[in-house]
Each structure stands twice: as C-alpha cells, then as structure tokens.
Image: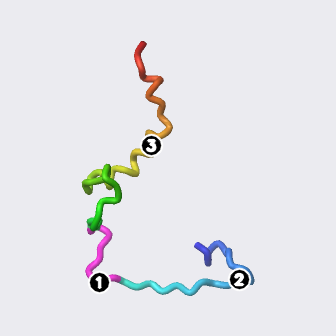
C-alpha cells in the first residue's frame, strides 16, 4: 500500500520479499497457544468475537417493556 499510494518522499519504493510457507493453505485453522482472554476460551468464541461489534451501538433500553 505504501508503494501503491506513493506515501514515500522522492518516489521511493519499499523492497518487498514474499516468503512462501510449505504446506500452508488459507483453509487451515490456527489454534492459539494461549487464550487471549478468560472470556475467549474456545475456538468458536474467538472466531465469533469480531461479529459482536455489530451490536455495540444497539441500546437494549429501547427493547425494555414498561
């Protein structure tokens, strides 16, 4: 992105090397060696955590029945 957007002065370009990993596929799941949080203690919770941002702006007060 730095090269493509021209962010470097004097039209400098970053040297990029791509190192391919043997036996790697994007279909492989990576198991974390430690839990990132006590509340994220299963692989499913870690995968689903990013989807919780959809509900950050939802006010549950508006759903309360009086």
Q: Which mark is residue 11?
A: 2
Q: Is residue 11 above or below residue 33?
A: below
Q: Is residue 29 above or below residue 59?
A: below
Within 10 Å of disc 2 (Cα), the crowding (few <14, some 14-19, many 20+) is: few
Q: How is the image coloured?
A: rainbow
Across and down, in percent, residue 28 comes to 27, 68
Instruction: Reply yes or no: does residue 25 show up in magenta.
Output: yes
Q: Residue furthest top?
A: 66
Query: Quadrant of the image for the C terminus?
Result: top left
CA separation in Å, label 2 and label 3: 40 Å
Q: Is residue 44 left or right of residue 18?
A: left
Within 10 Å of disc 1 (Cα), the crowding (few <14, some 14-19, many 20+) is: few
Q: Earlier in the sequence, mark 2 or mark 3?
A: 2
Task: Pick whichever, 41 or 30, lies toward us.
Answer: 41
Of tags 2 and 3, which is closer to the observer? Answer: 3
Q: Which mark is residue 51?
A: none
Circle 3 SS class: helix
Q: Which residue is mark 3?
A: 54
Circle 1 SS class: loop
Q: Which residue is mark 1?
A: 22
| Marks 3,1: beta carbons within 8 A | no
Q: Is residue 20 left or right of residue 1?
A: left
Which residue is rendered at x = 50% and y = 37% of the image?
57
Across and down, in percent, residue 64 comes to 42, 20
Instruction: Reply yes or no: does residue 39 show up in magenta.
Output: no
Circle 2 SS class: helix
Segment tinted magenta in the rendering: 21-28
């Amino acid at each position: 992105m730095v090269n493509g957007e021209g962010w470097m002065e004097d039209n400098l370009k970053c040297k990029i090397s791509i190192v391919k990993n043997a036996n790697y596929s994007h279909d492989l799941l990576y198991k974390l060696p430690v839990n990132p949080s006590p509340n994220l203690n299963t692989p499913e919770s870690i995968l689903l955590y990013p989807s919780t941002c959809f509900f950050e702006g939802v006010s549950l007060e508006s759903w309360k029945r009086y």
